[in-house]
Amino acid sequence: MMNNLNARLKKEIGNFSNRETIEKIIFDIVFKHVKDMLFIMKAEGKGQFRYLFANKVGIEKASLDAGCAGMLIQEVLPPEKADEIIYYYNQVIETGSIVSFKDNAAAMDGSTFFGESILTPVRDDSGEIQIIVSVTRDITETVHEKHALIESQERFRSIIDHNMDSIFSLDLKGSILSTNNSAYSTTGYTEKELQDSEIFLYWKDSDRQNFNNLFEQSIKGKALESSELAFTHKSGEKIQVHLRTIPIIISETVKGIYLIMRNISSQLHNIETIKYMAFHDQLTGLLNRPALIRDLDEMIAAERLQAKKEIAILSIDLDRFKLLNDSLGHNMGDILLRDFANRIAGIPGYDYRVYRQGGDEFTILIKNVNKAETEEFAGILFKLLKFPFVLNRQDYYISSSIGISMYPGDGFDSESLIRKADGALRQVKERGKSHYQFYSKEILLHQPNIVVMESNLRRAIDKRELTLYYQPQVNLLTNEIESLEALLRWHNPTLGYVSPAEFIPLAEDTALIVPIGEWVFEEVCRQMVEWDEKGLNELKVAINLSPKQFLQPQLVDKIKVTIEKYRIRPSRLEVEITEGAIQDISESLTIVKRLKEIGLSISVDDFGTGYSSLSYLKQFPLDTLKIDQSFVKEILSDQKDAAITTTIIHLAQSLGLEVIAEGVELPEQAGFLKDANCQKVQGFLYSRPLPPAEVEKLLNRTIAL
Ligand code: C2E
Ligand code: MG
Ligand code: MG
């Protein structure tokens, strides 16, 4: 191949004396040291190009062998490649000028080789293209680099475009060069509005200066973060944002910055809400128990540092709230608690805060008061409760009991001060409610502790401390005892006699009511069998079910098992439920229906105490209404109570229900009830609740009569 030289070249070199040597040197250089692929081709007409020369790189990279000298392209290369290459060679012939092109081919190692070729025509004296020189540069690396660059640019762009944060690319003057989608939704501005505008415009008031500072520092090369600034949305609304700046540094100079912005207003709002919820009672919006402890601790710490000042801790409980809540329903109960909270909130002249401990228990902390001033405050509270609470357009009167402890007299830490105020409150409740009491060591000595009571109550069944008394229910026309109401009694060696009004609510709160209730049922059945065996008249017995007990899922099944065990005729048993227990109609209706299916009678105890909707009377398969003793008590003196009692009797009769009036103590009351057509009565006038032995005596006497 080396011998077949282009004529012109030969001519140039031919002037030198050592021509051949020079020729050889030049070709040697070209052959060995030129890094580009070099092919010298003989142009014999369109489509006919014959290899004359190829340098070493060319031979290797194009995988040619020495035998290709003098061969046509199509004889050397595979047909497709040959066609492609010939096309460009033909162009050189057609245009008569240099042609360049890029192509790729499979390299020896299987990788793809990218080349950039320049085809240069070489003419003879007559201007005919005799030879075409092809120089091909290996641009594989450049192509790869370019691809990599494009790919990384695309990746970068997609990170920006799809980012949840708003990203602004800014120049050193603060002009916005580009943004992403999130920026439009966060700021309210369109791409067009943001493009080329100055970022500073979007920060108002003090945020403008703060943003400027952040920007100035960032263009000096500092990456910064801040959660303090608010961006002004297009609507004018300020949105709290988290900002991050990233200087764009190219060849050690800052060319601009990326500003990354996240809307954190909802996050902040959530944090605020969580904080608020942690220290507030959701129902009343008042501060809660954790807040009470926090504040009292803080107040004590502050007082210690200052001159000695007293703090009053008032523990407040609403009297009879549970009863009201049960009979009116929890919604009404909640409204009442809220109304109460509002009513006691704004007493002028005192520096105080109200907290809800839970249920109907509230605590008030009064700063900077002495005992006399605290007493005055309690007096104001009582006065505020003289006015009724209006629920469902009806008036309800609520009284409260207050126990008070004083810092520093009664203690130095929040825990013991609150405990002592609670202790004083319990004392108030025991002594008949509706007044206040300061804590004193003496009162706590003979105070039944709730915890002690609870642990005793837990053991009461096993220790056989519970008994049942029975109160006769008398037919007003015949004066005969027709039925009995079973009433629970608890005698404890340490606590003495504890009233059911006191321990039944405790049993309810601690779920002890479930085993106690089961015991009552079993005991009544056992007693009935005993009386039957003794030949006493078969009487009906009424058993009280408190609301929690009533809604207990296994209640009906357990009752059924007990009745079957003692073979008691179910119609001899009546269950007394309160209006509160049948608040949730869907659930309680199923239970009442199942009890009826077994064959039990159902009576509504304490009827008329507050609950205003009578629709349930129609829906529930009831048998008896028990007029609450509070109406009967005033029947002779209070026209309203007399009217209510007569109305209940009429109502019951028209619904085909039996009526029992409770708490009849005077013959005149019995007379009134008889005139009003009440069938049955129960009360001290006839008999107090009696132990079984006394009941037997009474019944025997009645039989004897
Ligand atoms: P209650 O079911 O309304 O029972 C009537 C209450 O009125 C009884 O109080 C009874 O002793 C009292 N009483 C009866 N006649 C008169 C009277 O003429 N004048 C006055 N002032 N009072 C009278 P007790 O025995 O203290 O029971 C209080 C409440 O405890 C009962 O009210 C009932 O709700 C509940 N209770 C009693 N035993 C049980 C029980 O076994 N289970 C459940 N869940 N609750 C019970
Ligand atoms: Mg009862
Ligand atoms: Mg009652």
Image: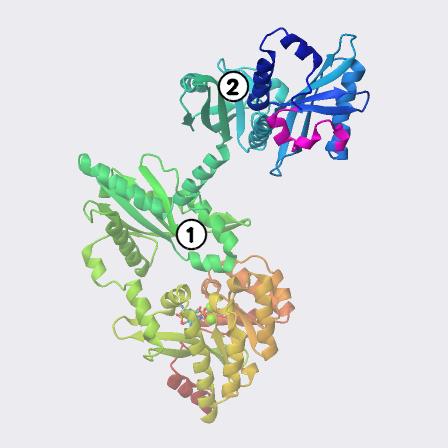
In-image side of 132 versus 282 (left or right): right
Q: What kind of colouring is applied to the model shown?
A: rainbow
Which residue appears at 57% of the width and 76% of the height? Answer: 601
Q: Is residue 279 above or below residue 91?
A: below
Q: How many C-alpha atoms fall within 10 Å of the one at disc 2: few (<14), some, or many (≥20)?
A: many
Q: Is residue 509 above or below residue 212?
A: below
Name the residue type under label 1: Ile
Based on the displayed image, in which of its 4 quarters is residue 592 positioned? bottom right
In magenta, the rendered stretch is 54-75
The reply, left or right, for residue 673 in relation to residue 15 is left
Residue 60 part of the magenta segment: yes
User: For the residues marked 1 and 2, what is the alpha-carbon distance in whole angstroms?
Assistant: 67 Å
- Residue ID for mark 1: 398
Q: Which element is circle 1 on?
A: loop
- Foreground tag (1 vs 2): 2
Q: Can residue 512 be seen by looking at this rendering?
A: yes
At a point 56% along the width and 78% down the height, the residue shown is 600
- Residue 598, by quadrant, is bottom right
471 or 204: nearer the eye? 204
| Image: 194 above or below 273 | above
- Read off the residue under disc 2: 170
* Relative depth, front residue between 186 and 407: 186
Position of the N terminus, as image quadrant, is: top right
Image coordinates of residue 300 in percent, x first then y, are: 23, 41
Residue visible at 45% across and 27% down in the picture: 244
Taking 370 as reference, is 44 left or right? right
Per the image, label 2 sits on a secondary structure element best described as: strand
**Could you say which is closer to the camera, residue 564 or residue 71?**
71
Q: Residue 414 in the image: state x and y as whole percent.
A: 26, 47
Q: Amino acid at mark 2?
A: Leu
677 in the magenta segment:
no
